Image (tube, rainbow, N blue to C red):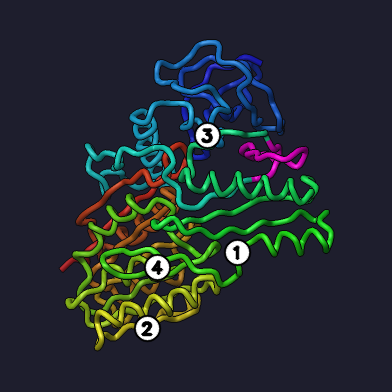
């Protein structure tokens, strides 16, 4: 099938229209290209396809489809064009949620980057080939594993650890079909932790071998942000692009005053790194048990700098910590992709804390939630930013600072 690609969507695929009128979502292409595709999922109203051959290339294409371990369209184009496309996706998310883009972002807003688009991730998941000793990536919207030898997203030290681990698995003759994926995480000093996950076919002996090769469940990595030491583990939440996260913190920190509530706090990276003498108190809230002990350790490290500070951590769901919104001057929100729970939004609108800092990895739920906060008439946006935390992927980070009116 030959298609002309129209526009890009939030999955990183491009939309095309088949002769039948059916919409086809194509991975590995760029807007304006003519491509030959293979349909791998055909449904009554739409289909998913992958690029087999580019017949008419975009002038912004710099790589062939499949050269990067993600088949998102952003992996094919130059970095400047990627940022232009991501800005379009943010605008599309606002249009979908029927909120004026200009209510949050300036018309001339740009996607902020540090210019680094390769080898930036401090954590990476390598899927195993399962047919032979090697790695693969899983195609978007499918379970197909495509053999992959070259990786340009993870830190190069992570790639070295992964290759050494693969060689050891082969030396131990662990059957490839029993290997699902390998997680490797590295701190700024070069220390690493890893975890090998087996498939359902793995025998007890293989599971034991993989456990022996993996880091201990309580293994700790350490990084320093704003002169504060932070501990985290292979599975706990920690930003994968530290330089870009640091830029976001520069915009958030000046608002840390009075009583601060950090919802969805993870291991405390935002709250504890931004806390200073202008804060009367800080409450961290996060439900994930993998984050809890690290958050407590990081809290105690922060208390070494601020010995009389009123800082505490609650291991609970944000929607069950609503009473803490009542005393908050600043509420920090960094939720998962699903966005803010309805109960949390309702409580914010009931209590109207002076300032809300909302950092989001999903423009669609970000637009939905900010729309509710603005529609109440209680808030206006004083500052906003769009970041490319995740180059060569479809993900985008947005930040809004909302101030209570009056």
- Of labels 3 and 2, earlier in sequence is 3
- Of labels 3 and 1, earlier in sequence is 3
- Label 1, on which residue? 215
Left or right: 44 as drawn, with respect to 71? right
Whole-percent x and y of residue 69?
56, 36
- Of labels 1 and 4, earlier in sequence is 1
Q: Residue furthest top?
A: 55
Q: CA distance from mark 1 to mark 2?
A: 29 Å
Residue interval drawn in magenta: 127-145
372 to 218, vertically: above or below: above
Whole-percent x and y of residue 87?
35, 37
Q: Residue furthest front?
A: 171
- What quarter of the picture does the C terminus occupy? bottom left
Crowding near the residue tagged with mark 1, few <14, some 14–19, many ≥20 C-alpha atoms within 10 Å: some
Q: Are marks 1 and 4 in contact (CB under 8 Å)?
A: no
Q: Are marks 3 and 4 in contact (CB under 8 Å)?
A: no
In-front residue for pair 394/305: 305
Question: Which of the numbered marks, if any, corresponds to residue 366?
Answer: none
Question: Which of the numbered marks, if any, corresponds to residue 345?
Answer: 4
Left or right: 251 as drawn, with respect to 205? left
Can you tell which quarter of the image residue 284 is in?
bottom left
Left or right: 139 as drawn, with respect to 204? left
- Of labels 1 and 2, earlier in sequence is 1
Q: Look at discs 3 and 4 and give the one toward the viewer.
A: 3
Q: Secondary structure at mark 2?
A: strand
- What quarter of the picture does the N terminus occupy? top right
Tell me what residue is drawn at x 38 percent, y 49 percent: 397
- Label 2, on which residue? 312
Q: CA distance from mark 1 to mark 4?
A: 39 Å
Crowding near the residue tagged with mark 2, few <14, some 14–19, many ≥20 C-alpha atoms within 10 Å: some
Question: Which of the numbered marks, if any, corresponds to residue 72?
Answer: 3
Tell me what residue is drawn at x 46 percent, y 65 percent: 221
């Amino acid at each position: 099938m030959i298609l002309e690609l129209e526009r890009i969507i939030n999955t990183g695929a491009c939309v095309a229209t088949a002769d039948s009128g059916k919409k086809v979502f194509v991975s590995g292409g760029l807007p304006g290209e003519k491509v030959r595709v293979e349909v791998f999922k055909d449904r009554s109203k739409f289909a998913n396809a992958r690029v087999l051959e580019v017949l008419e290339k975009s002038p912004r294409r710099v790589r062939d489809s499949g050269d990067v371990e993600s088949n998102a369209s952003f992996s094919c184009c130059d970095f400047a064009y990627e940022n232009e496309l991501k800005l379009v996706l943010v605008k599309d998310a606002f249009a979908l949620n029927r909120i004026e883009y200009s209510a949050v972002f300036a018309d001339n807003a740009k996607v902020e980057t540090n210019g680094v688009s390769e080898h930036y991730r401090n954590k990476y998941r390598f899927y195993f080939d399962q047919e032979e000793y090697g790695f693969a990536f899983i195609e978007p919207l499918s379970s197909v594993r495509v053999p992959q030898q070259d990786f340009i997203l993870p830190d190069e030290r992570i790639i070295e650890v992964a290759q050494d681990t693969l060689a050891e698995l082969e030396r131990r003759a662990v059957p490839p079909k029993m290997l699902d994926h390998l997680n490797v995480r590295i701190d700024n000093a070069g220390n690493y932790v890893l975890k090998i996950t087996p498939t359902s076919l793995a025998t007890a002996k293989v599971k034991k071998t993989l456990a022996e090769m993996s880091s201990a469940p309580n293994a700790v990595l350490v990084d320093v942000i704003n002169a504060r030491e932070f501990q985290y583990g292979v599975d706990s939440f920690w930003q994968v692009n530290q330089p870009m996260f640091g830029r976001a913190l520069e915009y958030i920190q000046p608002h840390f005053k009075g009583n601060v509530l950090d919802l969805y706090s993870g291991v405390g990276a935002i709250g504890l790194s931004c806390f200073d003498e202008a804060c009367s108190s800080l409450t961290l809230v996060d439900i994930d048990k993998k984050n809890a002990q690290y958050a407590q350790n990081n809290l105690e490290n922060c208390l070494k700098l601020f010995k009389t500070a009123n800082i505490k951590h609650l291991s609970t769901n944000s929607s069950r910590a609503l009473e803490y919104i009542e005393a908050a001057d600043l509420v920090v929100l960094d939720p998962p992709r699903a966005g803010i729970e309805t109960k949390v939004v309702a409580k914010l609108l009931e209590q109207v804390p002076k300032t809300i800092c909302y950092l989001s990895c999903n423009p669609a739920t970000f637009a939905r939630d900010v729309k509710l906060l603005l529609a109440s008439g209680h808030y206006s946006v004083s500052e906003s930013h769009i970041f490319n935390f995740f180059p060569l992927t479809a993900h985008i980070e947005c930040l809004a600072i909302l101030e209570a009116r009056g």
